[in-house]
Image (cartoon, grey):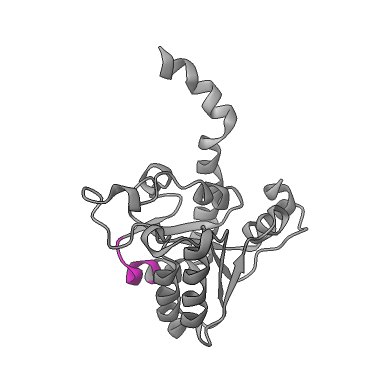
Amino acid sequence: WLRCLIRDGIVKKENIILSVARFDSPSHAKRQDVLIRAFGKFYLQQKDYRLILAGAVKGEGGKDYLSVLQKEVGKLPIDIVPNPSFIELKKLYAKAKFFWHAAGYGIDETKEPEKVEHFGITTVEAMSASAIPVVINRGGQREIINSDAGYLCDSIEEMVSSTLSLINSSEKLKRISQNAVKRSKEFSVDEFEKKIPEIIL
């Protein structure tokens, strides 16, 4: 559905960096605060993009965390979209050129594995809409992203430099975007059904 919207020109890509993750209490945060800091560094070098943080707000802790984030945004071109509808979320995926995610930032996985991204379904969803993932190198993100379909980063500086390198090379941006779509198909229901016999035998 998303690919058809993009292919048919109904939804066009914009200069958007998207992150989709729930706004939860600080102890379970997806680290949107890290993304705001990263975008602040990015914005010093590239003024033509905006960051969109979208996701469900979970409980009172989530509401408090959302308030903190809104204050941190300041005058940066960052939009926070709490509790987007399914249709709105699809359109955001379709418009975004990049997908950022920072769950697990600064975490020692051997000591606090519950604080990293266990799989990363939103990353796959973004890739299926040809948004290039530039994410923190923790947890399940490693299972999703290979070197031809996005970037696994160990710091916010690396997230910024990786994104800028793609913006500065339209050929590379197009190639990795196409590879991201191909890679996302490996996590489809059809592929899962094909592999079930291998799993149970």
Task: Tell me: residue 38, above or below residue 115.
Answer: below
The quarter of the rendered structure image containing the C terminus is: top left
Range drawn in magenta: 154-160
Residue drawn where x is 44% and y is 78% of the image: 42
155 inside magenta stretch: yes
Let me know if residue 168 appears in the view: no
Give how far across and how far down residue 146 sits, in percent. Answer: 39, 46
Q: In the depicted view, which residue is nearer to us: 155 or 63?
A: 63
Task: Tell me: residue 109, above or below residue 198.
Answer: below
Q: In the depicted view, which residue is nearer to us: 93 or 103?
A: 103
Residue drawn where x is 23% and y is 55% of the image: 108
Give how far across and how far down residue 158 sits, in percent. Answer: 34, 67
Let me know if residue 199 appears in the view: yes
Give how far across and how far down residue 94 sits, in percent. Answer: 66, 57
Give how far across and how far down residue 98 sits, in percent. Answer: 53, 62
Secondary structure that dominates the magenta span: helix
Q: In the depicted view, which residue is nearer to us: 1 or 164?
A: 1
72 inside magenta stretch: no
Q: Residue 40 falls in which quadrant of the image?
A: bottom left
Task: Tell me: residue 66, above or below residue 147.
Answer: below
Residue drawn where x is 40% and y is 61% of the image: 102
The quarter of the rendered structure image containing the N terminus is: top right
Residue drawn where x is 38% and y is 67% of the image: 159
